Amino acid sequence: MNNRVDDFAGLRISCAAKVAALADALRGIPHDLAPCRRASLVALREQVYFGWEQPMARARGAQLVFGKYEADGWWSKAAAALVSSGAAVRGTRQLERDHVEPVSQIVADLLEVPRSAAETAALLEERLVTCTVLAEEHRRLGGTESVGWARYEAAEVRYHLGLAPEAPAWDERNGPEDFDAESSGEADQVRTESSDLLNDADVARAHSIQNKGKPDASGVAGIDRTGTVDQGSSPGDLEFKSGIDGDLHLVLPAGQSVDGWKVTVVKANGEREVVPAEWHGAFSYYCTPAAWWFIELFGAAHVEVTGPDGTTAIRHHARLTRPADCPACARRR
């Protein structure tokens, strides 16, 4: 037993040391030779996933659903219902691993200052928390301006610890208790063997969400027009959304051209960076026709959006700064 503990402790430090070494290497590249910041963030994020999350999960003996989703981790109630109903299909995007704190922010902090292997391991263990959710729930979570577990409350995503209903005791490091518990204090209904993990209402809701937009008997898929506009958008209409890895983007509603738009990230130190439109197609994995701009979080105070008609709007987000605390706005006053 002691050998297993020692092996796990050694693996923990070894994996963390490699993450710290890559962060140090990226930080040490001379400014005139350094890759763009996003390239550094992506490289370090990949190391965190493949060099920390995966080997540590294997070492813990984590049971993985479809080889990816930890059965003993956090689950939304609807995602658990989908799996328990047998309707979840491997290789589809029905389920998503949501980082409760965006991994892009964690990676940015790792790049900011040097850390030892032990300090890196402690940071990753404390902040790298995931929850398995439906793809539709992931979209809603990305559209909130809350942070951490408050995103789930804002997006009305109910969750608990563990795929099975008999969740382990709350670990305060990983998040709050299952706030899905009935506030009335009424006892849960007794589940029969046929009810499996969750009740029929949860399963039905999961099926309803997953079938949204699928072809009907005529073979024509229903069109989800949520978020689309038929008329021109103003700078205030662009939406902050999180991408597949938790990166923050400003997204132009569907049906709009990027021509004439200008997005500028204003840093807390006064620097200004005009951000190019990254693509004009299907945003992230939600396949929403749109155009978007990547917003670098590091040092950003607010975003200035200028529309084709020349009007400009200052946009704030909880992951940047709030209006009352915005240093860029303070300089304008």
Image (spheres, rainbow, N blue to C red):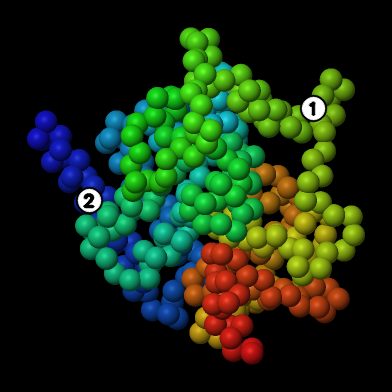
Q: Is residue 237 left or right of residue 109?
A: right
Residue 239 drawn at (x, y percent): 70, 60
User: What residue is disc 2 on?
Assistant: 14
Looking at the rendering, in which quadrant would you find the C terminus?
A: bottom right
Residue 266 versus residue 251 in the image, above or below: below
Circles 2 and 1 in contact, beta carbons < 8 Å? no
Q: Is residue 66 above or below residue 234?
A: above
Look at the image and tell me in which quarter the N terminus lies.
Answer: top left
Mark 2 closeness class: few <14, some 14–19, many ≥20 residues within 10 Å: some
At a point 38% along the width and 53% down the height, the residue shown is 127
Relative image position of residue 40 (x, y in whole percent):
45, 64
In front: mark 2 or mark 1?
1
Q: Quadrant of the rendered structure where residue 255 is? A: bottom right
Disc number placed over residue 175 in the picture, else none: none
Q: Position of residue 62 (x, y in %)?
A: 34, 31
Mark 2 or mark 1: name the one nearer the start of the chain: 2
Residue at image point 33% right, 52% down:
126
Q: Which residue is mark 1?
A: 215
Closer to the camera in the image, 8 or 183: 183
Write the residue at 37% across / 28% down.
63
Q: Judge from the rendering whether residue 280 lies leftward or rightward of residue 155; answer left or right.
A: right
- Can residue 141 be seen by looking at this rendering? no
Q: Secondary structure at mark 1?
A: loop
Disc 1 marks a residue whose amino acid type is Pro
Residue 129 image offset from top left, x and y in percent: 41, 47
Residue type of the residue flagged with mark 2: Ser
